[in-house]
């Protein structure tokens, strides 16, 4: 665990990884849905697989899991 603010608190690095992954997913997911359902896809080789939508969904799920799994709780101060 990393040191917190100097007051005996500690935060897991996985919490920050989860937050960043969740934010990336929340940006990609609606953009991928807009591309897929609005017919605005770029003409690439595998555009029919809708990779932006699926990566956005995957990143949102993983980011949500890590964010809620490693979020700071009131009783975590003494665990470090």
Image: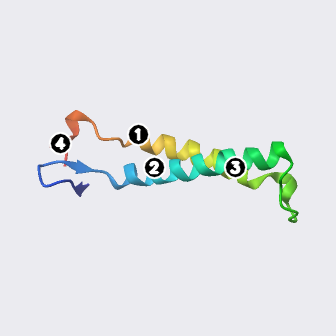
Q: How many marks do you count on the picture?
A: 4
Query: x and y percent of residue 35 in the render?
Result: 79, 50
Identified at 54% across, 46% down, the residue is 62
- Residue placed at 22% from the left, 50% from the top? 10
> Counting residues from the N terminus, which is met first, the one under dot 3 or under dot 4?
3
- The residue carrying pointer 3 sits among few (fewer than 14), some (14 to 19) or many (20 or more) residues within 10 Å by Cα, namely some
Q: CA distance from mark 2 to mark 4?
A: 20 Å
Mark 2 surroundings: few (<14), some (14-19) or many (≥20) residues within 10 A: many
Q: Is residue 15 above or below residue 46?
A: above
Can you identify the residue that label 1 sits on?
69
**Element at badge 4?**
helix
Left or right: 28, with 2 as reference point: right
The image position of residue 43, as x and y in percent, is: 88, 63
In space, the residues marked 1 and 4 are separated at their CA atoms by 16 Å
Q: Say which quarter of the image contains residue 57.
A: top right
Q: Earlier in the sequence, mark 2 or mark 4?
A: 2
* Residue position marked by numbered label 2 in the rendering: 18
Q: Are marks 1 and 3 in contact (CB under 8 Å)?
A: no
Q: Is residue 19 left or right of residue 58?
A: left
Q: Are marks 1 and 2 in contact (CB under 8 Å)?
A: yes
* Residue, disc 4: 77
Q: Residues within 10 Å of mark 4 (few under 14, many from 20)?
A: some
Of the two numbered discs 1 and 3 on the same chain, state the one appearing first in sequence.
Answer: 3
Mark 3 to mark 2 CA distance (whole Å):
20 Å
Closer-to-camera residue (76/23): 23
Res. 31 mark:
3
């Amino acid at each position: 665990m990393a040191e917190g603010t100097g007051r005996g608190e500690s935060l897991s690095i996985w919490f920050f990884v989860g937050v960043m992954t969740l934010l990336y997913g929340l940006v990609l997911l609606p953009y991928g849905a807009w591309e897929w359902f609005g017919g605005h896809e770029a003409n690439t080789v595998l555009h029919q697989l809708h990779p932006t939508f699926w990566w956005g969904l995957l990143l949102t799920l993983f980011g949500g899991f890590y964010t809620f799994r490693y979020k700071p709780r009131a009783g975590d101060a003494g665990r470090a």
